[in-house]
Amino acid sequence: MKITHIRNATMVIETKDKVILVDPMLGAKGKAGPTFTLFRYKARKNPIIDLPANAIDIVNKTTHCLITHLHPDHLDKKAEAFLKSKNIPIICSVKDEKKLRKRGLNIIQTVNYWETSEFLEGTIEGIPAVHGYGFIAKPMGNVMGFYIQLPNEKSIYLSADTVYTDDVHKVLSEYKPDISVVASGRAQLDLFQPLLMRMEDIIKFVKNSPNKVIANHLEAVNHCPITRKELAFELASKDLKEKTLIPQDGEIMDF
């Protein structure tokens, strides 16, 4: 299995003849969405960086697309246009199907929470995700993580935009994924609590992960203050750096 970190939460999973695009935000710098904060963090249109040079060549190989939720930093207009132009088969939460079909996307499969279904000769299961601490999680809407097992490949847990919950803990401790992906930017709006795990919960996620962790959702949108350097320092101080990959945009990881 080969995984390319594109930018933010966008990644490409390559396995045999299948190429799975995850949460595509493909717009140019400042073209995918509005600023998410006005005063807590510097107001800048998103994304705050361009795509890496190798992104389009890799994305163009896409055979399937997996969407965890509908926020513009996980599915922007440029990505929608790409998916429609190539009629890419899309897999999503059963709760997002109606909206995505209305946008003209080719939904071939929906996934429900804690239900396993067939996926590319393997299986996929929907895992609950809670997009924020306290009150803010409800207006942030539906999010779904995915636990994927493909034949003769490492199992992968895409935890999606979530805080650390009993459900996240259950997957890490009982399913024991070979690769776990954690959104690590600690996104926060001008008001309310963070939308993603605080540093202590990222540390907890890595500590409780049985195998390798990929940290993403870093340095790409204006409301995520945690940097790669800061995260690496914290992980190193807890002797957790060796089990964690903090990829640069465009970096390819082999598993």
Image (cartoon, grey):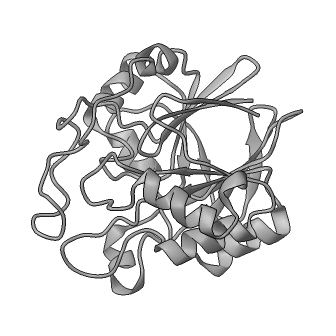
237 left or right of 80 in image: right
Which residue is outermost to the right? 152
Quarter of the image with the N terminus is top right
184 left or right of 73 in image: right
Q: Position of residue 40 (x, y in %)?
A: 17, 70
Q: Position of residue 214 (x, y in %)?
A: 61, 49
199 or 28: which is nearer to us? Answer: 199
63 or 203: which is nearer to us? Answer: 203
Report which quarter residue 208 is drawn in. Answer: bottom right
Quarter of the image with the C terminus is top right
Q: Is residue 126 above or below residue 207?
A: above
109 or 253: which is nearer to us? Answer: 253
Q: Is residue 64 above or below residue 158?
A: above
- At 41% from the left and 74% from the top, the residue drawn is 132
220 or 121: which is nearer to us? Answer: 220
Asked whether the viewer can see residue 184, the reply is no
Q: Position of residue 79 (x, y in %)?
A: 35, 31
Asked whether the viewer can see residue 59, the reply is yes
Q: Is residue 54 above or below residue 43?
A: above
51 left or right of 228 in image: left
- At 44% from the left and 60% from the top, the residue drawn is 230
Report which quarter residue 145 is drawn in. Answer: bottom right
255 left or right of 41 in image: right
Q: How many marks?
A: 0
Q: Is residue 192 above or below residue 176?
A: below
Q: Position of residue 137 (x, y in %)?
A: 39, 76
